[in-house]
Image (cartoon, helix red, strand yellow):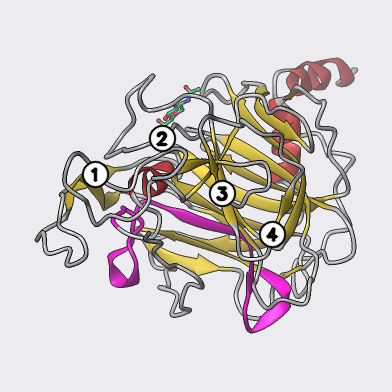
Amino acid sequence: MNYALPSLFALASVVQAILPNNVVTPSTSGSLSAIKYTNVGGSGTYNQVTSMIKGSWPSCTANPSCITTPKQVSGPLAPFNEEMTAVLRGPMTLHNIAVYQPSVNSSSATWKRTSLWQQNSAPDNLVFMNNKGGGASGEWDIGDTIACGGNSQSFANGAFTDAVGSPNAEVHNGNLPNGNEVNIVTATSCTDVPCDGFARGTASHGWAGSKAFVFEFEMPSDGSSTPPAIWLLNQQVVNAAQYGCNCRGMGGQGGCGELDVFEVLPNNLNQGISEIYSFKGATGGGDGNFFARPTGGVVTYMAILDMQTDSIAIQRLSSWDFGQAAMTRSIVDGYLGVPSKLVSFAAGNKRRSERPKFMHRRTMH
Ligand SMILES: *[C@@H]1O[C@H](CO)[C@@H](O)[C@H](O)[C@H]1NC(C)=O
């Protein structure tokens, strides 16, 4: 009797994970190559911003001024299944950024490249923003009375230091100076298609559902003590006020979602950590587990947020072909299966970080 034939058929009917060829030597403690959050989603509420009330500058006495209403969410990745933006803080040199998403939320869907930016090139469905609204683009006041919500988003200039009047009006060479922040959004504005939650100024859509962000970058040590960072936020945070009235939630309240992908902290400028925050609480890589800061060359990191497996994987790769227009589900499964520092975000394993967030300042004119 020959059993080979039936078992071959059985194999063919299951999508097999394929081990990708650009995984770096696994390290799952200390200096990490990969961290994976499981049991990410949950059922709960966050305070969605529905309005920002005008006040009078400089007293800002409108009370309340930040109007919120509880929004109920549930399901895989929730609230990280909602639209998200990626924020970057210098000193950093950015080389390439790509975003991949399945075109349907099904277990076999191929993930297609939906956004791309390469150094010194015009991006595809990706816009660099910053929080300098009120000058060349965006707004600082709402309507005819000055509001006290601070700057809205604006379109970032080529040097990432100021605002310009239209999306990607200047070519970006990728040098993000010490202390400057930019974030990326899609090319669809909230004026074109209405956004969830309160949106003002240049507000835009982020990437919803399952998504993978790939970043190729350096974090040079330029002698300054500003810690560079890459983190993801619910798009609604920047559409209201990243450093003011927003749904992020701090302290015991929880919120609409933040994922620190690679955050260097002031107390150790050679290490980048990862943490995750939502209405469920917070957790992270834990003491002594970190990504080595790339001060001496380019590195590639991918953050995969996957609804199918309710997990988020952040991992270092040896390289990435940014010309690659798609990756099959089996390759996605291969990345999700890479040996990683495993962190459960399940109920019962939640910790509210006591660590103060660096530079969560509010900018005002
Ligand atoms: C996948 O599901 C999420 C959450 O329900 C949704 O926001 C997103 O639009 C879906 N994506 C696709 C491509 O259908």
Q: Where is residue 301 in the image (x, y as percent from the top left)?
A: 75, 50
Q: In which quarter of the image is the N terminus?
A: top right
Disc 3 residue crowd, few under 14, some 14–19, many 20+, Cα 10 Å: some
| Vertical order, 76 against 2 (above or below) | below
Cβ atoms under marks 1 and 2 closer than 8 Å: no
Disc 4 residue crowd, few under 14, some 14–19, many 20+, Cα 10 Å: some
Using the numbered discs, state the Cα–Cα distance from disc 4 to disc 2 in whole angstroms.
Answer: 23 Å
Residue 333 in which image quadrant: top right
Task: Report the span colored magenta.
Answer: 245-272
| Vertical order, 311 against 164 (above or below) | below
Q: Which mark is on residue 202?
A: 2
Mark closest to the chain's N terminus, 3 or 1: 1
Q: Nearer the viewer, mark 1 or mark 2?
A: 2
Residue at mark 2: C-beta within 8 A of ligand 1: no
Mark closest to the chain's N terminus, 4 or 2: 4
Q: Mark 1 points at which residue?
A: 72
Look at the image and say whether residue 265 sits in the magenta stretch: yes
Using the numbered discs, state the Cα–Cα distance from disc 1 to disc 2 in whole angstroms.
Answer: 26 Å
Q: Name the residue under label 4.
A: 177
Using the numbered discs, state the Cα–Cα distance from disc 3 to disc 4 in whole angstroms.
Answer: 11 Å
Front-most of 279 and 57? 57
Mark 1 belongs to which amino acid?
A: Gln
Mark closest to the chain's N terminus, 1 or 2: 1
Residue at mark 4: C-beta within 8 A of ligand 1: no
Q: Which mark is on residue 273?
A: none
Label 1 sits on a secondary structure element that is strand
Label 3 sits on a secondary structure element that is loop
Label 4 sits on a secondary structure element that is loop
Q: Where is residue 74 in the image (x, y as percent from the top left)?
A: 33, 42
Using the numbered discs, state the Cα–Cα distance from disc 2 to disc 3 in whole angstroms.
Answer: 14 Å
